[in-house]
Amino acid sequence: MPFHGEVVWERVGIVAIGSGNRVYLLDIHTGDLRREVEAPSLIGHLSMAGQAHDELLLILGWTDVHPIESDLSTRWIARHIAVDGLYVRTLT
């Protein structure tokens, strides 16, 4: 579903909920907002990537990729890599 997504990141203890161009990172136990991320483009999909010691939350927009580190900081932003949405099925 475009402009909407959710993922549970158990190791970090958050639930990521995306809508429109914002992703809310909520504490899995208390529901407290730990970070709000404004994505570069509308949310298309949220996905986990990497190994347990180097996991990333990928915020996939219509044109951009916005990976989030386990400390909830932004690793980098790749802009304009698509024109009609991004989706990751699996990463190894």
Image (cartoon, rainbow, N blue to C red):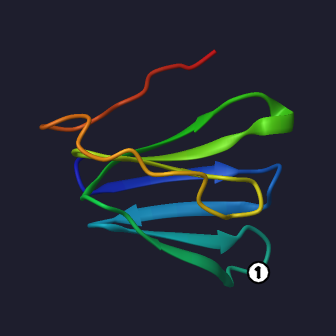
Q: Quadrant of the C terminus?
A: top right
Q: How many marks?
A: 1
**Residue at 30% in and 67% down:** 21
Q: Amino acid at mark 1?
A: Thr
Q: Is residue 34 left or right of residue 59?
A: right
Write the residue at 44% across / 22% down.
Answer: 89
Relative image position of residue 85 (x, y in whole percent): 21, 38
Horizontal relation, residue 46 to residue 1: left or right: right
Q: Secondary structure at mark 1?
A: loop
Q: Which percent across, then down, holds residue 81? A: 26, 35
Residue toward you, 69 or 19: 69
Q: Residue furthest bottom?
A: 32
The answer to whether 16 is drawn above or below residue 79 in the figure is below
Front-lying residue, 84 or 6: 84
Residue at x 65%, y 43% (from the top left corner): 56
Residue 29 locus on image (x, y percent): 79, 72
Question: In this orientation, which residue lies closer to the viewer: 79 or 15?
Answer: 79
Residue at position x 77%, y 28% in the image? 51
Does residue 1 sit above or below 87 in this rendering? below
Horizontal side of 4 relative to 2 (left or right) equals right
Q: Quadrant of the N terminus?
A: top left
Query: Label 1 belongs to which residue?
Result: 30
Q: Position of residue 46 (x, y in %)?
A: 46, 46
Left or right of 45, for residue 41:
left
How many C-alpha atoms fall within 10 Å of the one at disc 1: few (<14), some, or many (≥20)? few
Q: Farthest residue toward the top?
A: 92
Q: Quadrant of residue 4?
A: bottom left
